[in-house]
Image (cartoon, rainbow, N blue to C red):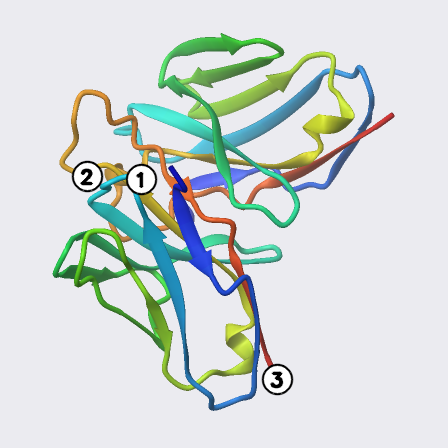
Amino acid sequence: QKEVEQDPGPLSVPEGAIVSLNCTYSNSAFQYFMWYRQYSRKGPELLMYTYSSGNKEDGRFTAQVDKSSKYISLFIRDSQPSDSATYLCAPPYNTNAGKSTFGDGTTLTVKP
Amino acid sequence: NAGVTQTPKFQVLKTGQSMTLQCAQDMNHEYMSWYRQDPGMGLRLIHYSVGAGITDQGEVPNGYNVSRSTTEDFPLRLLSAAPSQTSVYFCASSYSPRGRIANTGELFFGEGSRLTVL
């Protein structure tokens, strides 16, 4: 079993929709989580990170962690076609040396 | 800064051939790693290194070798290519895993190397 499980995609929404991307984790020791965004034929890039309790907002993006249920969410408001990408959740790499730790990713398409 | 640079971007091999995927970073990162990404299986860690002269296996190391003679470079060698090694390979780097206050545990990725083994 992976330490981070991600809702499978793909996900297709119209422009302007609110998007919710979700992951669950099993290791209570994780202190915070990262969201990476990967455009087609590119490497993943860090989008944002948040500590293992509470929310973090950055423009149209909000990352949320519910420690009690071990649930991680990324919300995108007013989604744009430029948000079309694969989104991956992961704990910091250095918390689990030797293990992959990434979720499988959810591919999002925002249609104009 | 160029960040993490991978070469080649594309490669086609025949079964049994060997090759090396190159990875270089100019951020003075101590940690470097190789992942493969396959549809439906996400990113899987092949090998990693916490500093020059130190390497260790990830989750899917079979068929791959690595070395780390300098801080900047971390090449991945395929010894005898097999069709199962057809994949997109990503090199990633980060600050020391022993951590600094500023180390969020973020990985910096290259653009990827697409390998097809016939």
Q: Position of residue B70 (x, y in %)?
A: 18, 57
| Dot 2 alpha-carbon crowd within 10 angstroms: few under 14, some 14 to 19, many 20 or more | many
Which amino acid type corresponds to the residue marked 2 in the rendered image?
A: Pro
Whether residue A3 appears in this view of the structure is no
Which amino acid type corresponds to the residue marked 3 in the rendered image?
A: Leu
Report in which chain the residue with disc 2 lies.
Answer: B
Residue occupying the point 13% across, 36% down: B98
Q: Horizontal placement of B32 versus A104: left or right?
A: left
Residue occupying the point 57% across, 42% down: A105
Residue B118 circle label: 3
Q: Which residue is mark 2?
A: B97
Residue extending farthest to the bottom is B16
In whole angstroms, how far apart are the C-alphas of marks 3 and 1?
Answer: 33 Å
Element assignment for label 3 = loop
Report in which chain the residue with disc 3 lies.
Answer: B
Element assignment for label 1 = helix
In whole angstroms, how far apart are the C-alphas of marks 2 and 3?
Answer: 37 Å
Whether residue B101 appears in this view of the structure is yes
Which image quarter: residue B64?
bottom left
Q: Which residue is mark 1?
A: A93
